[in-house]
Structure formats: C-alpha cells, structure tokens
Image (tube, helix red, strand yellow):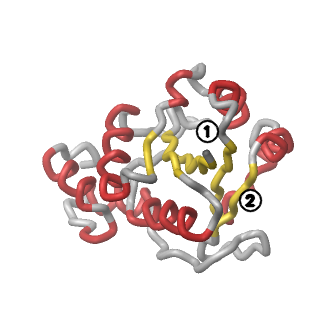
Amino acid sequence: MRIALLGGSFNPPHLGHVLNACHVLAAHRVDRIWLMPVYRHAFDKALAPFDVRCELCERAIAPFAARMAVTRVEQEVAPGSRTVDVLDHLLPRHPDDEFSLVLGSDLLGEVHLWKAFDRIEQMVRIIVVPRAGYPDPRAQGPVLPEVSSTLIRQMLARGEDPGALLPNGVRDYLREHPIYR
C-alpha cells in the first residue's frame, strides 16, 4: 500500500489540513493518507494534549475515513523524537508499504533545521504541496486557502467562531470543550 504521512501539530486541525490531504490523495499516487500529530513539538511549542489533537484529527477526517486515518506513531517513539526517528520506527513495522512524506512548500526553507533530512529523503518520497507566499518548483498543484492553526487559536481565544475554517467535527468538539479559550 502507498501511504502518505501528513505530519503536523494539528493544534487544531483545520480546513487547510483536510484540503491538503484530499489534494494528495487526488493528485499523487497514494492509496491512503495518515495524519501524524506530533507528540511533542521539536521546537517546544505549546500544544493541546496529544490525545485531544488526535481526537480532533479523527473528527476532521471522518468523512474521508475510507482513505484517511490518524496514526499515533509519534507516541510510540521517545518524546521529542524527530521525523527521521519516527520513520526509523515506522518503516520496519510496515515492510510491504511504500511511504511518502507530505511537506508544505513553506517548510522547505527549514529543512536545514531538521535532523538528518538527507536520510529522510532516502527513506521516503517527498511530496511538496504549495503554500501561499512560498513558491517552489517542487510544489505541485493549486495553492490551497491560507489558514493556520495560530489564526484559529487566536479567533477561539477571542470568542470568535472560525466557521468554515474548521471541519464540522472539530468545530463541534471545540464548542463543547473550549480548550483554546
């Protein structure tokens, strides 16, 4: 099976994440996409609890469950592990699967900060998706709507409803559990 890994903080997951996943499934030779929430951010950014972010991801992709899933693999690896460590853990457990790693074009300028990015490129195929303001010839497809988890958290903290910037299941959960207020 060809599996694309879409990693991120997902703090919270938003429409941009879902559109990214749909784009990868539609435009690249991928059978499934796994959302891979970070267990602990590599640069120590404050995050909602891991279990909450996983639940929000599950809700975000629920309409697409036939081809999308959430993996908790980062929880299985030592806290603070980097992407290469996660791949070292994951790939031997799925020897018959072919993995790709989805990156936004905005991240390409930061790969020098990643642990062993050159090894990552040898381990998995990199799929680069375009982000507004970060043109790159490796990025394929349309630029998706500009939305960020930071913007969503700011709106929620002010008591504003992000509306259609959040998938229905995420919005419903956050109405019941105001974790970003």
Residue 29 position, x and y percent, is: 65, 61
Residue corresponding to mark 2 = 108
Within-10-Å neighbours for mark 1: few <14, some 14–19, many 20+: few
Q: Residues within 10 Å of mark 2 (few under 14, many from 20)?
A: some
Which amino acid, by three-letter code, is at mark 2? Leu
Element type at marker 2?
A: helix
Residue drawn 41% across the image and 48% down it: 11
Depth check: 25 or 85 in front?
25
Q: Where residue 39 appears, x then y in whole percent?
A: 50, 31
- For residue 126, which quarter of the picture? bottom right
Q: Earlier in the sequence, mark 2 or mark 1?
A: 1
Above/below status of 119 relative to 159? above
Residue situated in front as seen by the camera: 162 or 31: 31
Front position among marks 2 and 1: 2
Mark seen at residue 43: 1
Looking at the rendered structure, the kind of residue marked 1 is: Phe
